[in-house]
Image (spheres, grey):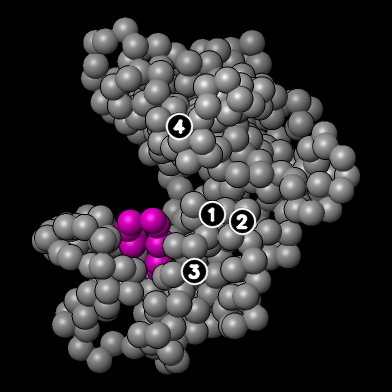
Amino acid sequence: MPTALLILNAGSSSLKFAIYQAGPAGDLQAEYRGAIEEIGRNGRFQVFHAPDAGGLVDQAVTAANHEQALKQVLDWLEARHPGQEFHAAGHRVVHGGADFIHPVRIDEQVLSKLESLVPLSPLHQPHSLAGIRALARLRPDLPQVACFDTAFHHTLPPLARQFALPREFGERGIRRYGFHGLSYEHIASVLPDYLGAAAAGRVVVAHLGNGASLCAMRQRQSVETSMSFTPLDGLPMASRCGALDPGVLLYLLREEGMGLEQLDDLLHHRAGLLGVSGISGDVRTLLESDHPHAAEALDQFAYRVSQAIAGHAVALEGIDALVFTAGIGEHAAPVRAAICRRLAWLGLTLDEAANRRHAPCISAPHSSVSAWIIPTDEERVIARHAWTLA
C-alpha cells in the first residue's frame, strides 16, 4: 500500500504543499514542504527538505492557474521519486459550515455542499475547491480528504454561537463559526505532553500569525473563540481589522460613498498592523523599526490580545494556562512579554529569560497561570486525517 500523503493548502494566488510518509506503525513524518507563489503572474516554486529545512528548489515559474501549479508540483515529485504513488491527498478547507464538523472523504455530493458554502467564505472557499477539482482531473483515482478550519469549534455552546440578531438569521447560517481549527486541534492533541493533567483544565490558546485568533478550551474542546462569522472578526491582524463597530461600515458606505469592493479591500488588506503603522503588517519589520507608529501598532495589538484573553477567561470562569502558537506566538518574544505583563492581574508572572530564549514554559515557577510556547502543525493534522479516512 502506498505510504505517501499529499497535503494541499490552496490560496488565492498560491499553492502550499507538503509530502508526508507513513511509517509501519502509522507514524507520520514530513518529507518535503513547499509552495508555488504568485499563480497567474511570474511566480516562484520553492521546496524544502522538511527534516532539516534544507532548500531543494527555488526557481521562477509561470502557472496560469491552480491546475498548472499543481501539475508542476506533481511533475517535480515524479522526477524525484519515479513511480511513487500516494495513499491520499488532504486539503485544508476554511469553511465547513454547520454540517461538516469532522474531516470527510470528498465525493461529488460533498463538493456540491462545499460549493454552497462559498457565500460564507468567498475569499477562501473557491480556491480550496479549485485545488480539489484540479487534483481530481490530474489524479482521478486518488482519494481526497477535506479538513475544515471551522470543525474544531462545533463544540461551542449556543451562547457562544449566537449573534444578537433575530433568530431567522441564525437559521440562515449567520452565526459564529470560528476558524484556525486545524491549528487548535493540533495544540489540543499535544497539550498533555506539556501540561500533563492540567491539559484538561481551563486553557486559552493564542494563535498569533498573519491571521490571529484565540480559543478557550475546557477538556481540550473549544468553548469560545475570537473569530466568528468570518476570519475578519476578533483580534487585529497583519492587514485585517479585527473587531469593528458595525456602525463604522454603515458610515463608510453612507457618508464616504465607499463601494463594497473598496470596503472589502480596506478591511482585509489595508487595516490591522499595516493600517495602524503605515509601515508593514509584518511584526518582524515593526519590531526592527524605530518609527513611533510601529510601536503604536504593536502596543495596540498586545492590548487587544490581552483584553480578549481576559474575555476568554470569563468563558472558562478562570484560566489555568495560556498557550502561544503560530508565527508571532512562537517567535516574537517582545510581543508575548507585552501581552503577559498586561495579564499579571490574572496571576500570570512571566519568566523573562525563558521568554527571550523561547523556552516551552515561559511563566515563572510561582505563577498561578502557566504560559507556554507550543509549535502548531496544521499539516500533520490534515495528514493524520487523510491517512485514516482514505
What whole-number distance in Å separates the C-alpha atoms at marks 1 and 2?
5 Å
Q: Which residue is mark 4?
A: 266
Q: Which residue is mark 3?
A: 129
Q: Hey, what amino acid is under mark 4?
A: Leu
Q: What residue is shown at x 76% (from left), y 32% (from top)? A: 316
What whole-number distance in Å separates the C-alpha atoms at marks 3 and 2?
13 Å
Residue 284 - label: none
What whole-number distance in Å separates the C-alpha atoms at marks 3 and 1?
11 Å
User: 338 or 178: nearer the eye?
Assistant: 178
Q: What residue is shown at x 52% (from left), y 22% (from top)? A: 256
Specify the quadrant that holds the C terminus. bottom right
Mark 1 is surrounded, within 10 Å at the Cα level, by few (under 14), some (14 to 19) or many (20 or more) other residues, namely: few
Q: What residue is shown at x 68% (from left), y 48% (from top)? A: 177
Among the two numbered marks 4 and 3 on one chain, the one whose residue lies closer to the N terminus: 3
Q: Residue furthest right?
A: 167
Question: Is 293 left, or right, of 203 in this rendering?
Answer: left
Q: Residue furthest top?
A: 292
What whole-number distance in Å separates the C-alpha atoms at marks 4 and 3?
26 Å
Q: Hey, what amino acid is under mark 2?
A: Pro
Q: Secondary structure at mark 1?
A: loop
Mark 3 is surrounded, within 10 Å at the Cα level, by few (under 14), some (14 to 19) or many (20 or more) other residues, namely: some
Residue 214, placed above or below residue 383 = above
Q: Are marks 2 and 4 in contact (CB under 8 Å)?
A: no
Q: Quadrant of residue 210?
A: top left
Q: What is the magenta range?
A: 7-16
Among the two numbered marks 2 and 4 on one chain, the one whose residue lies closer to the N terminus: 2
